[in-house]
Image (cartoon, helix red, strand yellow):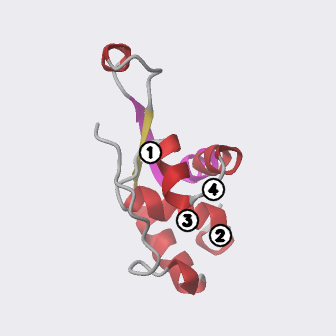
Amino acid sequence: MSQSTLSYAATAVLQSIARGYRHGFDVSRATGLPSGTVYPALRRLEAARFVKSAWEDHKLARQALRPPRKYYEITRSGEEALAAAVARYRLLDPDEGRRRLRPAKT
């Protein structure tokens, strides 16, 4: 995946991670995209090294009575790809259309 091939959905997912939405369900809520779109996009973004991920400690998840979350973080190359894609998809302006959702607390 190169900067010029980021789909609109992948761009929205990458942008949400850059804004602090760190796990898949949070990204899905922030973008309004279904999980069947978000999780494959996350895998492709990670394969392209635009994001990196880490699983949370299983003990923390168990204490919260839920499965462990995989947290994502944008990389420098991801930031560059995002800037190019946002320029291409003007509808994803960083200041336009922000949802009032907040990232989940880690």
What secondary structure is marked by label 3?
helix
Quarter occupied by residue 88:
bottom right
Q: Mark 3 or mark 1, which is nearer the start of the sequence? A: 3
Q: Which residue is mark 4?
A: 33
Labels 4 & 3 near each other (Cβ < 8 A): yes
Image position, residue 90 (x, y; %):
55, 86
Q: Mark 4 or mark 2, which is nearer the start of the sequence? A: 2
Q: Which residue is mark 3?
A: 12
Q: Which residue is mark 1?
A: 52
| Residue at (58% x, 48% y) in the render | 42
The amino acid marked with disc number 1 is Lys
The amino acid marked with disc number 4 is Leu
Q: CA distance from mark 3 to mark 2?
A: 6 Å
What secondary structure is marked by label 1?
strand
Eyeballing the image, is 95 above or below 42? Answer: below
Quarter occupied by residue 89:
bottom right
| Residue at (63% x, 51% y) in the render | 41
| Residue at (51% x, 70% y) in the render | 81
Q: CA distance from mark 4 to mark 1?
A: 20 Å
The N terminus appears in which quarter of the rendering?
A: bottom right
Q: CA distance from mark 1 to mark 3?
A: 16 Å
Image position, residue 5 (x, y; %):
68, 70
